[in-house]
């Protein structure tokens, strides 16, 4: 098997990792912080509480679609503003390093770049889309 033969599997690995991350973040909001708690947190940021519900839906739905490989490029590019929003609303003021108290913006910035790469590469192997 040549390196070129492995490209679709590398794309699959990226797609699966991104999907699991989004699904985990969405389920954390849903099952641990609960919808009302998530909405309250978003209100504490100065955003309407409904943005918390929309974020949960985007993370759970988007993560599931990425894992399955359905509309991968579209889903990945639609999720970029969500991740960039975390930089603007939460992590940007905490400095660069994600290990800083409250988490800096290095991780969400990398996550946004990985989403753009995924959008440009498509679904890879074993996708339903």
Image (cartoon, rainbow, N blue to C red):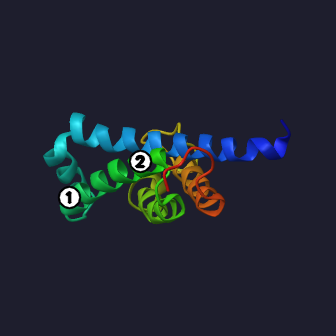
Answer left or right for 14 relative to 78.
right
Where's the N terminus, which quadrant?
Answer: top right
Which residue is the extreme one toward the right? 2
Spot occupied by residue 23 in the image (x, y as percentages of width and height):
38, 42
Q: Are marks 2 and 1 in contact (CB under 8 Å)?
A: no
**Residue 3: quadrant of the picture:** top right
Does residue 81 lie above or below 38 as drawn? below
Of mark 2 and mark 1, the one earlier in the sequence is 1
- Circle 2 crowding by C-alpha within 10 Å: few under 14, some 14–19, many from 20: many
For residue 13, which numbered disc appears in the image? none
Compared with 90, 21 (above or below) is above
Q: CA distance from mark 2 to mark 1?
A: 24 Å
* Residue under the image location 82 percent in, 47 percent down: 4
Total residue callouts: 2
Element at label 1: helix
Mark 2, residue position: 63
Identity of the residue furthest to the left in this view: 36
Between residue 92 and residue 39, name the one nearer to us: 39
Q: What secondary structure is found at the residue carrying circle 2?
A: helix
Q: What label does residue 43 carry, if any? A: 1
Q: Position of residue 36 (x, y in %)?
A: 13, 47
10 Å crowding of disc 1: few (<14), some (14-19), many (20+): some
């Amino acid at each position: 098997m040549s390196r070129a033969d492995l490209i679709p599997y590398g794309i699959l690995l990226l797609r699966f990792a991104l999907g699991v991350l989004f699904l985990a973040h969405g389920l954390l909001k849903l099952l641990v912080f609960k919808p009302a708690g998530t909405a309250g947190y978003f209100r504490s940021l100065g955003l309407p509480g409904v943005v918390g519900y929309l974020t949960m839906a985007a993370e759970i739905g988007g993560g599931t679609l990425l894992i399955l490989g359905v509309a991968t490029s579209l889903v990945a590019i639609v999720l970029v503003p969500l991740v960039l929003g975390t930089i603007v609303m939460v992590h940007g003021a905490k400095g660069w390093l994600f290990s800083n108290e409250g988490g800096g913006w290095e991780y969400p910035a990398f996550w946004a770049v990985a989403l753009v790469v995924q959008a440009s590469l498509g679904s890879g192997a074993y996708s339903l889309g």
